[in-house]
Amino acid sequence: MMSPNGSVPPIYVPPGYVSQIIEENGVRRVLVLPQQPEFHPGGHSPLHHPPPPPHAHLPAFIPHPAMMPPPPHLYTGMAGGVGDMSSQYISQYHPAHIYSEQDSHTQHGRPPFVHRDDRTSKTYERLQKKLKERQGGGVGGQVKDSPPPSPQKTCSSPSTLDVQNGVGGKSLEAEQGQPSHAVAGTDRQTGRGKNGESGGRDIRELDEEAQALLALLSTISKPVVSDIQARRAVVSWSAPTKSDNENGNVEDDSSPPEPLSYEVSISFNGKDGKYKSMYCGEELSATLEDLRPATDYHVRVQAMCNCLQGSLSEAVSFTTLTCEPDPPNPPKKANGTKNTLVLQWKNPCDNGSKIQNYILQWDEGKGTGTFEQCYYGPQKQYRVTKLSPASRYSFRLAAKNDMGVSEFSEVVDLFTSCSVPLPPFPPELEMAGVTWLCLKWQRPTSSPKEDDIYYILEMEEEGSGYGFQPSYDGDELTCTIKNLHRSTKYKFRVAAYNSEGKSNPSQVVEFITNPDRPGSPCRPVIRGRVQPNSFKMAWEPPKDNGGAEVTKYVVELSEGLSGLSWELVYSGPAMEHVCEGLKPGCSYQTRVYCMSEGGQSPLSETLQVQTPAVPPGPCQPPRLVGKPKAREVQLRWGAPQVDGGSPVSCYSVEVSGLQSEESREVYQGPELDCSVGGLMPGKTYSFRLKAANKAGFGPLSERCEVTTGPGAPEQCKPPSTTCKSPSCVVVSWETPPCNGAPVTEFRLEWGAAEGSMQVCYSGPGLSHEMKGLLPATNYFCRVQAVNVAGVGPFSEAVLCQTPCSVPAAVNEEEEEGDSEPPPPLYSPSTCLGICWDPPCDHGAEITSYLIDLGERQPVVVGPITKHIIQNLQPDTSYRIRIQALNSLGAGPFSHTFKLKTKPLPPQPPRLECTAFSHQTLRLKWGDGPAKSATSDALQYQLQMGDKSGRFISLYKGPCHTHKVQRLNESTSYTFRIQAFNEAGEGPFSSVYTFTTPRSPPAPVKAPKVERLDESSCEVTWEALPPMKGDPIIYTLQCMMGNSDFKQAYKGSATSFHVQNLQPSSDYRFRVCAIRQCQDAPELSGPYSPTVTLTPQRSDAAASGSAAGSGSRAGAESIRARRSLTDEQCAFLLLMVFAIIAILIAFVIQYFVIK
């Protein structure tokens, strides 16, 4: 095998063979050759090499996974001194790198065969001879030992080659287990092709020899079973033989080159069941031991040679013989009393023959080891009587069938019962836990040791109310009761019993379970304020104390937030503690745990505490900057020498009077200077300074005294006001402190609003009179003093309210009739609706209004702003003024306003019917044109009554005529009319009734005239239906020439035969319909179109004239006949429209869509 990448897969070789790796020109070859057993290089010990590089160029033996032997022993192969191989062949491989290894395998646990017979030697010599003939000779030389394989190219994983029956491509020497030497050579003249071809032929011949050996192993015959016993049998077989030579190149040998081994396997589950190997060796017979009696077995044999396994032989069946039963199990005690024992046992395996009897023996209680038979029979139970109480008896059992008696079972000792045991001593507590108690007790002293005594431990939980309940039942003297409650008292007692009965319980003892460890205390909290060097902490006890009282609490403290080191600061029963000796401005962590009888609780949650910093030290007194002003000074200072462990963040300046001890803060901030205002001029002040950090303010500095300069006067006291009248107020004030300079001027501000006051007086006086004020009005005033130093602040504003007075004049009124129509009870022609805005009441509520109408008596109304003046003259002007009144009197009148009443509404006109028909009525009213403009002052509303008596408006406008259409014939209609103008709507007229006449018949179509002869013709016309039950008759008129029409016929027929006609005269006919009314005269309809009947010309006349006359008469007759009916005309029009629509659709489809 050749690999271009240089990797060599692992090659597994059988015992006696060695693989060699030859590398030349970057190509590696692997050779598998037999090794001479006689050749051992002197002075070289076997070496254990790792597996070869993971690649090969020649096929190698890959065993089946089931045939894998233990790890192989590798030996270093020698390249020199290889038997009879020529030196020329060996010298060709001198420059090549040669790696060799030897693998020794064992099969079926047997060591490899070292002995080689003559057949093996002959086979080896024959193969060596073939290799020499194919590879040719070379220059003699000796190849040195091969170096060990390269560790970079070793691999222990076997290559995955196709394995069939445990045989891959391998040589015959590999099958026979011969050792081999790795001898390699190359012919530089012949090249690699020759070597590759010779190697392929060699491998093919080796495979043929392996197949021949495998075929020989598969010819084994089926085994022969003899000497069959109950538990053993002898199996023998014949060695495989070969009749014909399958390989012509191999000598005529009928036996394999090495001794064969055989494997014998049996199955007791049938021919196709699972087989178990019973023998593996080189002998041709085997004795099968440890078989089951009376059992069917199948046995088969397989031949093997080294790692080759032949086919399994045909299975042979045999059956073992029957024998005596197996030894039974010892009998067991089923029941017993003081004097009896009931024994039971189970039947053993009968080994093919049914068990007939059992033999029970006992020692009669003597204990000497001598047994006597006490029962013989087929039963599997027996009662032994007349025994001594509390005594030991030994028994053994044997079974018997037709083949013999089995061996006796093991001896078993049984005891008879004794009397009821005495009450045992109370149980004792051996160990206690949180949820369990371990108790022990003693065996009653009066009971013999041979007696089987059992115990019942009863328990009662305190407060459960269930009494004693059994907790244990057995023969042990200790018991652990579990699943108990912690710190709970339990009562126990024990009773003993045997087969004779139960004793009385022992005395009751009480035991208490241990308490559990308590839960963690609640998270500690801070009590009070955290001090710079201490803080007080408190905690609550744990929610679960574990069943025992907490004995002490332990507090641990850690400086910083890391929590690496904790210090115990308190241990005691209290639930609060003051941690002292702390550093200001540091962070601390504290935690608590508690202790009780149950143990130590878990730690509580950690509480973090930050101690406050210390306030800074005292500052230097502030110093004055510049010249002091009258009300302001400028101060400056420096930082304190001690900041208290925290940067100074704020400064506070306090000021106080020279004699006063009270001080006030005038500045607070981070700056180092400030301006202090609000001081009194010409006074001495004392200033002190203190600094603050996050811990608070430090102590005050020493005092710094500063005197201010003169200033403006002080604030005046609020002025006093005195009302002399509703429109006059006197304001007076006092002189304020002057602050070192006399007051030279006072300024008084006055206004209706506090924010909009104006100076109304300036002078040295102490009072001022304000005039022209409004009654019941709020005014504000304030005063300030002025001296040479400046203007003092204003005094507080004083509110002054003038007294109440009569109302003010009404300043506006208007007529309401135009904007809002008066109620129906009032006529706009006789009343006036007025409204006004309420005037100022001057502090007293308006109680009424007085409306003055001039010559008429005034009208007094309540406190309203609307009023309707009634009983006035239409179309009359009135002068009106209004006066408001309150509790203090009447106010002034308003300005005079002129209002005029509207004229009276017009009266309804007379309604007339000027034209009528059976469907229309033309109505007329008044004396005016038929049509008028919409801007006329006088307009009319015409209404018509319906069937329910209601009137519906037909017309509303200025016209004097109206045509009512779509009426029914011979029906009475009611109408009324109303006139209205700016003054309002007048009354409706009385109801007028007008009746439509009957409708005349419809016109008759032109009659048809048909000449019968020269002096007669027949006139026909269409019939009309009756009109509302009235019959229809017809009147036919005829006119000859240019004379008048004369009635030719009157009746209900629709045709008439006219006679006595003059042949030379023209006749014209027309028809009208007449409606015969029952209670009214006849109504004639319009006449139909005229139809002319021309005379016929004589034969003596000119042919042209005759022909012309005849043709005209014929044409007239044909025209009369061919006149179409209305239905025919409608159908014809419908067809024409349908054809046109189809054509239009076709045009749209063809020209527009496509």
Image: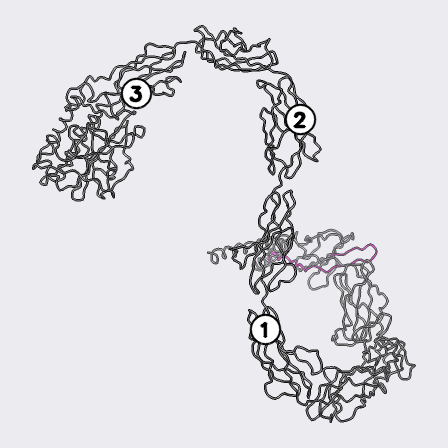
The segment highlighted magenta reads 1073-1101
Question: Is residue 86 toward the left or the right of residue 898 in the image?
Answer: left
> Overall secondary structure of the magenta stretch?
loop
Looking at the picture, which amino acid does disc 2 mark? Ser
Q: Position of residue 357 (x, y in %)?
A: 50, 7
Cβ atoms under marks 3 and 1 closer than 8 Å: no
Q: Secondary structure at mark 2?
A: loop
The residue positioned 20% from the left and 21% from the top of the image is 256
Residue of label 3: 280
Secondary structure type for disc 1: loop
The disc at residue 506 is 2
* Residue 879 as seen in the image, left or right of residue 537: right
- Binning the other alpha carbons within 10 Å of mark 3 as few (below 14), some (14 to 19) or many (20 upward) gives some
Mark 3 vs 2, N-terminal side: 3
| Label 3 element class | strand
Give the side of residue 977 with respect to residue 572, left or right.
right
Give the total number of marks visible in the rendering: 3
Residue 439: numbered disc: none
Q: Residues within 10 Å of mark 2 (few under 14, many from 20)?
A: some
Q: Which sits in the foreground, 551 or 989?
A: 551
Residue 794 drawn in magenta: no
x, y (%) of residue 617?
Answer: 59, 73
**829 or 1120: which is nearer to us?**
829
Please identify, in this view, whether the residue under mark 3 or under mark 2 is nearer the observer: 2
* Residue beneath disc 1: 617
CA gap, disc 3 and disc 1: 108 Å
Between residue 323 and residue 333, name the one nearer to us: 333
